[in-house]
Each structure stands twice: as structure tokens, then as C-alpha cells.
Amino acid sequence: MIAREALEEMLSRLEWMAVKPSVIIDAGCGLAEASLQLQKRYPLAQILSLDNSTAMLTEANASFRVCAAAEVLPLANQSVNFIFANMLLPWVAEPKKLLREWRRVLRPDGLLMFSTLGLDTLRECRAMTAASLFPMLLDMHDIGDELMAAGFSDPVLDVNYYTTSYRSKEKLLAELQASGMLFAGSETAIQENMPPSTEGKYEVTYEVVYAHAFAPSSEASTTAANGEFKIPVSQLIKTRD
């Protein structure tokens, strides 16, 4: 599944990050596969495996489980060093609110790393049915702008494309449904209209956006009484270089 591919890629990118977090959120943890890998990489850190599904958390193999929406975290301001979120954004109704909440709980110089789905995801299927029947797809450039607007610094984004082939349309639909990529109502249109490729297989594309950014250092940002983060213009100019 594409989520597992994205997870492996994100974990490999941690080799580039000189961070030693003491508190980590695995946001949208599901069965906490990422939590286990993060605990191995950072054995002294406390991993908070967070998901809004009690069913998932019940099955998750995690030490510290938190049932909450990622947009409304039951955590104090600047209480976390590292937020890790693999394929959570496509199922969040208000990404801007989510980024502001993540910015609130991150400590100065804290790291945010996440993956999400770009606009080319399932392009073979989306031409056949309404866009509202699929998870939210985001443009990489818009994500970068929203990270800056939320008060993050030094955002870095790039994309990878993955193509998955299936021998039958039934297998394709079964996997898309199991992964939550299809909402109710889209199956019939795809079943009736999606043609196979020239090799007789059914192919779908995933555009995966990888992003990381930092909370500004304590010298670079201040928090107003109303909770808004203020960053000097000089800092913004620096991060756009």
C-alpha cells in the first residue's frame, strides 16, 4: 500500500535530520507502525501515538496512546519536539487549522515532517466521478504557502510518483476501498468506465508530497496574547532564500 511506501521514505529522510527529540507525536498513527519505528530510532523519546479512532488505538501496539483529533491536541503550547504524520492530511477537513495547531504545540526549533497526496493522485479514476468522492488532494506549492502562513520556517517539499498495476478491476477497487481512497458512490463509475492499459492491466498513479519544516527558534518568534504567532520579516525573508 502507498502509505507503507511513504512511511519507509519518511523514515529514510530522518537520516538527514540532526534532531534528538524527547517528545514525539505520531499523528494519525493508525496501528502505530510508525510509532514503533520512531521508538527504535529515538529510544529515549516519549512517543505519543495519536489517532481519533478508538478502534485503531485499541489494536495499536503503542506505549502511550492518545485518542484525539490532530486539529485539537490535548497538549500544552510548545510541549513537543517532533511531529510525524504519514498520510493524515488527505482525511483532514481543515488543513490550515491543523497546521496552526501543530505550530502551537511545537517547541522552538521543533521538527514537523509529514506526507500527503498531491493533485495527480488517482488521476486515472478521478476523471470518471466527482472529486468530492475522493480524499482531499493538495498542491505542493499551496502546502508550502500554508506552512509559512502558519508560522513555520525553512519548509522543504518535494514529490514522488508511484504507479500501481492490477490484473483485475475488482482487485483495484478492493484495495482502494480497503485503504480509504474511495468514498461511497465512486465504485460504480470506476467499474463501468475505467479501461485497462495497453498491457491489459489497470494502473493508478499516486503523487506523494513529502514535507518538513521547523518551528522558529525562540529568538525568531513571539506569541501574542491572542495566541497568534509573530515572526520578524527578516526571518521570513531568510527562509525564502
Image (spheres, grey):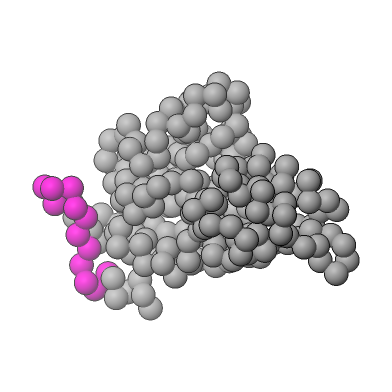
Give the residue displayed 58% in from the left and 57% down from the top.
Answer: 129
Give the residue displayed 33% in from the left and 38% down from the top.
Answer: 72
* As drawn, 239 above or below 69: below
* As drawn, 240 above or below 222: below
Seen from this angle, which residue lies furthest right?
Answer: 199
Give x and y (percent) for residue 77: 27, 40
In screen coordinates, is 232 left or right of 161? left
Point out the stretch of residues depicted in magenta.
224-235
Q: Is residue 166 shown to the viewer in this render?
A: yes
Q: Quadrant of the C terminus?
A: bottom left
Seen from this angle, which residue lies furthest top?
Answer: 58
Give x and y (percent) for residue 88: 50, 46
Give the residue displayed 66% in from the left and 48% down from the top.
Answer: 188
Give x and y (percent) for residue 70: 40, 40
State the residue in front, 41 or 232.
232
In screen coordinates, is 125 left or right of 26? right
- Is 108 magenta? The answer is no
